[in-house]
Image (spheres, rainbow, N blue to C red):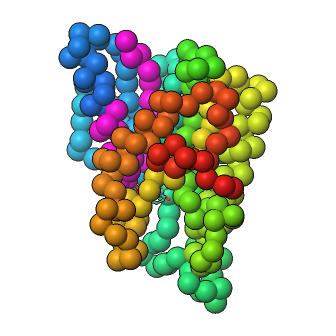
Amino acid sequence: MNNKNYLIIGGTGGIGQAIVKELLQRIANEQSDENIGNARVYATYHKSQPDFAADNLYWLPMDVSDEDSIEQAIADIKQQTSHIDWVINCVGLLHTAHNQPEKALRQLETDFFLQSMQINALASLLIAKHIRPLLAKAERDADQPAIFATISARVGSITDNHLGGWYSYRMSKAALNMGMRNLSIEWSRSLKDVCVVVMQPGTVDTQLSSPFQSNVADEKLFSPAYSAKRLLEVLDSMSAAQSGSFVDWAGESIAW
Ligand SMILES: NC(=O)c1ccc[n+]([C@@H]2O[C@H](COP(=O)([O-])OP(=O)(O)OC[C@H]3O[C@@H](n4cnc5c(N)ncnc54)[C@H](OP(=O)(O)O)[C@@H]3O)[C@@H](O)[C@H]2O)c1
């Protein structure tokens, strides 16, 4: 029986929404097996609440660049439940209406760099800071840990960087990875059996990647639904001992 509570940050994005839908499908399948549980999916939106609804889906507003907004959304969840079992942060920023990823240093702009750091790196730490009491109440053990996952990116790997460019995105994802590795060490001491993980989702057909898909072979461009399924399968298999991992959609480790 699935009594898990899931929190998907960025539930309206390409990958985030696919994860929300896949989780709801899993819950519905379990219920049709008459194994009825109380699983819930809490999902956050940023600019506007989608009209997509389901019985066990609860939408909350959250701007991850504003700590008060993170705190408020989590306070609202606390009114509804005592525990969150899985958190998956699917928010990310690669380009805006005004800024494309830098091809060269001369294109670097302070505001865009700091915005990337705030959304891609700092947000997961702030979410972790505020969600901790709800994760602490999750029923869990070393084999079936609570999950604190963030979608990172392979381009955040320093070892894997052979192409250069994309200063703001690469640096913010590398900073995210360091933050989550740090958190995994802190929580291995003070919040047992929570698996902290950063993940590469593949190259996925979303608005984030759409300007950069021309060199990607068709079979290497994943649908959001496929990526979501694979990412959730990887998370299903995670043990507490794997906290602090950087893995791809197939569960393969990525060098830092
Ligand atoms: N797609 C790929 O090929 C690929 C590859 C590697 C890694 N990733 C990573 O995967 C994650 C998901 O990306 P995606 O492809 O699904 O992109 P996406 O469709 O652009 O989704 C990004 C989400 O982030 C939200 N967001 C942006 N700023 C926010 C803020 N300040 N507060 C709250 N939410 C905010 C957006 O909401 P609004 O639109 O409402 O602002 C949107 O829901 C990102 O971390 C990305 O870096 C993607």
Which residue is painted at 67% across and 29% down in the image? 241
- Relative to 105, does residue 14 appear above or below in the rendering? above
In magenta segment, residue 3? yes
Where is residue 69 shown, x and y percent of the image?
53, 45
Q: Is residue 116 visible?
A: no
Stretch in magenta: 1-23
Image quarter for ligand 1: bottom left
Would you identify the image quadrant in which residue 33 lies?
top left
Magenta stretch holds residue 178:
no
At x 41%, y 65%, the residue is 208
Q: Position of residue 120 (x, y in %)?
A: 58, 57
Residue drawn at the location 46% of the way across and 47% of the way down: 249
Q: Position of residue 149 (x, y in %)?
A: 55, 40
Q: Quadrant of the C terminus?
A: bottom right
Residue 4 shows up from this direction: yes
Residue located farthest toward the bottom when viewing the structure as drawn: 106
Task: Choose top left, top right, bottom left or bottom right for residue 152.
Answer: bottom right
Q: Nearer the viewer, residue 51 or 135?
A: 135
Q: Quadrant location of the N terminus? A: top left
Q: Residue at x 44, y 56 (%)?
A: 202
Number of marks drawn: 0
